[in-house]
Image (cartoon, rainbow, N blue to C red):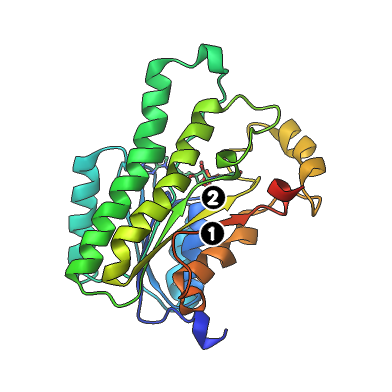
């Protein structure tokens, strides 16, 4: 791996990293040399525990609900103590979806989506930025996880509220980036396309039909999108901030 992508000596935090896209991002960052902590409401899948010895980095997971500010603050306090206050890379990735029609979406459903997908991302980024500033990180990188759902309707799925939350993530990115640039912290977002995870697996017929909409003709596996996260975390993207990176097999351009 070229030195521009090297993350040795850096510390990363990934929310929603117990499985799926978050786990792939955590693995990618560890492969590039970063120590990695994971916040999630569930214990990580077996594979997470192998990362540490596989890449000779420190890893640790914490049970944290990103939709609760108390839980997030407690998680950050524990993480800070365990990793000596270091934090260079933060990937707020935890997210949920609801397949409910626009006319049937209940107020409580939308509240839940907002809590995890919008406030969870926003306050994870805020607490991470405070820790980076306190620790005088020189190369801070925050990578918000949005979605192609911030650009387009998801065909055959009823996800207007989800699309709204992902639009909010993409919209907040340049504004946060503008405020953090003076601290040497870059903020970008990632918009994955259709990825085969627990989130999409309840809809195998959709995974099949989506293939026709994707320029390269196949749904992504989580491993397909992890390189984009490493790129944004590393010096290879030093001149990039406030941007959205679509990792979508060309679906938004076709
Ligand atoms: P997933 O369901 O496999 O993983 C989501 C993870 O977030 C899970 O480990 C879950 O336990 C965790 N999580 C949920 N609520 C949480 C909370 N309150 N606090 C902490 N952790 C919580 O889904 P995924 O597909 O890997 O999704 C990861 C991210 O990628 C989400 O933000 C999702 O919106 C986004 N995304 C996914 C796709 C896709 O096609 N799968 C496409 C675009 C964007």
Examine the image and state in which quarter residue 174 appears.
Answer: bottom left
Give yes or no for contact between labels 1 and 2 (Cβ–Cβ under 8 Å): yes
* Above or below, 32 relative to 112: below
Q: Residue at x 44, y 45 (%)?
A: 171
Q: Residue at x 39, y 47 (%)?
A: 172
Residue 184 lies, in percent from the top left, at 31, 72
Q: Which quadrant, please, contains the N terminus?
A: bottom right
Q: Secondary structure at mark 2?
A: helix
Question: Closer to the camera, 222 or 233?
Answer: 233
Residue 254 lies, in percent from the top left, at 77, 47
- Lateral position of residue 253 relative to residue 76, left or right: right
Residue annotated with mark 2:
20
Residue annotated with mark 1:
24
Q: Spatial distance from mark 1 to mark 2, Cα to Cα?
A: 6 Å
Label 2, residues with CA under 10 Å away: few <14, some 14-19, many ≥20: many
Which mark identifies residue 155? none
Q: Residue at x 44, y 78 (%)?
A: 33
């Amino acid at each position: 791996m070229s030195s521009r992508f090297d993350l040795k000596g850096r510390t990363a935090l990934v929310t929603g990293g117990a499985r799926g896209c978050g786990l792939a991002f955590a693995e990618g960052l560890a492969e590039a040399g970063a120590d990695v902590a994971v916040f999630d409401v569930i214990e990580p899948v077996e594979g997470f525990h192998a990362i540490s010895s596989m890449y000779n980095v420190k890893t640790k997971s914490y049970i944290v609900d990103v939709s609760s500010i108390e839980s997030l603050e407690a998680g950050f306090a524990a993480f800070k103590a365990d990793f000596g206050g270091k934090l260079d890379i933060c990937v707020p990735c935890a997210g949920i979806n609801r397949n409910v029609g626009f006319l049937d979406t209940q107020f409580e459903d939308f509240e839940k989506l907002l809590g995890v997908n919008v406030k969870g991302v926003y306050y994870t980024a805020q607490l991470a930025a405070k820790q980076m500033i306190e620790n005088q990180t020189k190369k801070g990188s925050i990578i918000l996880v949005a979605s192609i759902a911030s650009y387009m309707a998801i065909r055959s799925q009823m996800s207007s509220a989800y699309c709204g939350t992902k639009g909010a993530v993409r919209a907040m990115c340049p504004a946060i980036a503008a405020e953090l640039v003076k601290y040497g912290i870059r903020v970008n977002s990632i918009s994955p396309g259709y990825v085969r995870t627990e989130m999409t697996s309840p809809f195998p017929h959709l995974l099949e039909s989506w293939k026709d909409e994707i320029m390269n003709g196949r749904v992504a596996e989580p491993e397909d999108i992890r390189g984009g996260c490493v790129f944004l975390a590393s010096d290879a993207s030093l001149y990039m901030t406030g941007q959205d990176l679509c990792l979508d097999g060309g679906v938004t351009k076709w």
